[in-house]
Amino acid sequence: MKFSPLFWPVKLKGDTIYILDETLLPHKLAYIKAATCREAAKAIKEMKTRAFGQVSLVFYTFLLVLKQNKGSKNIFKVLQKTAGTINATRPTLPFKLLTDLVLGWAREGGLENKISGFLELLKAKRIQRAEEVSKFIRDKEAILTHCNVSGELPLIAEFCQRQGKRIEFYVTETRPYLQGSRLTAWELKRAGFPVTLMTDGMVASIMAQGKITKVIVGADQLAQNGDIANKIGTYQIALVAKHFKVPFYVLCPPASKAKTGKDIPIEIRPDKELLEYQGIRLAPYGVKGHYPAFDITPNRLITRHFNLNLQR
Amino acid sequence: MKFSPLFWPVKLKGDTIYILDETLLPHKLAYIKAATCREAAKAIKEMKTRAFGQVSLVFYTFLLVLKQNKGSKNIFKVLQKTAGTINATRPTLPFKLLTDLVLGWAREGGLENKISGFLELLKAKRIQRAEEVSKFIRDKEAILTHCNVSGELPLIAEFCQRQGKRIEFYVTETRPYLQGSRLTAWELKRAGFPVTLMTDGMVASIMAQGKITKVIVGADQLAQNGDIANKIGTYQIALVAKHFKVPFYVLCPPASKAKTGKDIPIEIRPDKELLEYQGIRLAPYGVKGHYPAFDITPNRLITRHFNLNLQR
């Protein structure tokens, strides 16, 4: 398999975490370094990495803290403090679920091996899921996607290719952060698959032409009733897909403690991120912006959830 | 009334047409000059002005050509050539309807007065329509709009204000040209009305919160069955509004000859306009973009058409 740099965007080498700086893509492929828990949390807050990158960064941060505090008697307290710092970064991602998992392992002992083993399992299960999804896709399908599914789409396309199926992608640019243009179009083009970029407003127009056969998106959180939180814009794509009877697939993390989408808090980001782009002011001064980073897509609009099954 | 510069963005002074350069807004309020039919057509093609600005520019171009060819024996041929140049600019706007109207008047005689009278009528009817729309709006409504309705929204808001009703606006930024941020948010803010900017992907999210009470958009063309062509993105807003039972109002020009929306050709713009912004490359090189400038909203999604009634 060829992996997109976005499939595994965080690495730990020695006492330093290397985080793929997604804000510099597609123009520059570069990693920022984090040598402390605080620096890692800052990278999450500033969305230098997102989605799966943030999840893996949580585990790597604990590995780093373990390394830096080897032999310390207060290691559990240090881990608790680490968990608190991570939990405080962004509300919509279920960081507490992850940090609670790690604190649970810490109580049992053998934490370092448990984290490393879990990361290996995650990698294997994500590859397995890409293969599973590929089996639902037929030859010559055109798949619409939104935001970025952390390197899983090029894998799905590669599995399709091995099965003799040619597929193409339509990618919404995903304002305001442009993850669709900057990340998804970039990784698909890089992997050699046909990709067409469109604005977030073109979904109904292109589906009305019958060009799209499936939607595949990721999810930042899965509630117990099947509702998902994902990048703002996902909900209306699901509504439009339902109208045009286009199957809507979601690649989900394991369910969080939220019973329904209503229990998932939605992060409101600074409106500057919407009103400016790379220092260019897009909107008139004095106008306020509205920027919820996520929206909730109800279960009834989702044709199929592809959950990460983390049982070994 | 206070008029937005976008309400009447084209003027003829002497032998020069002054066209509000909408591409410089909101940072600079400046007019470009056109001294020939060819320069006027270029301003249309390059979208220096759009929507009502383009319509009025067609008439001003004929007035200019009349002035420049006073006493010419071949005036009808010159007018026909002018019509041809204008008709060739952009496919989705029904320019031929307008130029045929002018050529018809030319055959009857008294063309200059007829054009001037028609422009005065247009102005009066647009003001009248704004007042009519205002009567459908109650106190404390929140109106979502897309793209730019050529200065009619500030007028509607002013009529509401006179009737003691406070209303606010939510404006989609309207990628890729950002008419929502650059023009609509600007003119509403300038006129002193509350306005919040959002991305094109946030419509379902904000309607799910019950924040929007009406949608008001314009139309670049109205087919005889009530379908409309308007800025790309309009169709999915109408679908989402229908889902949330939010009334969807359209300010329309008189119907064209198109029987249904299917008879309206959709202009495909250069994908560069989607892949770059003010010289900043947004997408990776080598990726292609899809940029239909308009989409068709079917009649059944439209709660009410506000047609321009041009009978005196």
Image (cartoon, coloured by chain):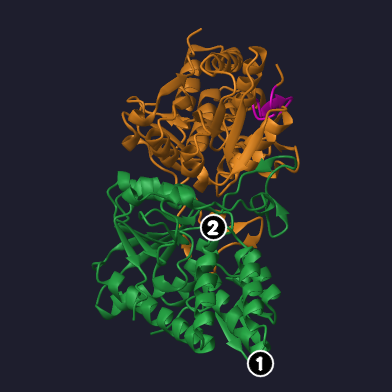
Chain colours: A green, B orange
Can residue A308 be seen at all in this image of the molecule? yes
Q: Position of residue A273 (x, y in %)?
A: 66, 54
Picture quarter with the N terminus of chain B: top right
* Pointer 2 residue: A92
Question: Considering depth in this image, is A73 or B130 the residue closer to the camera?
Answer: A73
In the image, what residue occupies the spot 62% across and 73% down?
A80
On the image, the x and y values in percent for residue A303 come to 29, 55
Q: Dominant secondary structure of the magenta stretch? A: loop
Q: What is the count of numbered marks?
A: 2
The picture places residue A31, in percent across and down from the top left corner, at 63, 79
Q: Residue at x 46, y 55 (%)?
A: A229
Quadrant in the picture for residue A305 = bottom left
Near-viewer residue (B109 or A282): A282
**Which residue is the site of mark 1?**
A71
Q: Residue at x 51, y 63 (%)?
A: A94
Whether B42 is among the magenta residues is no
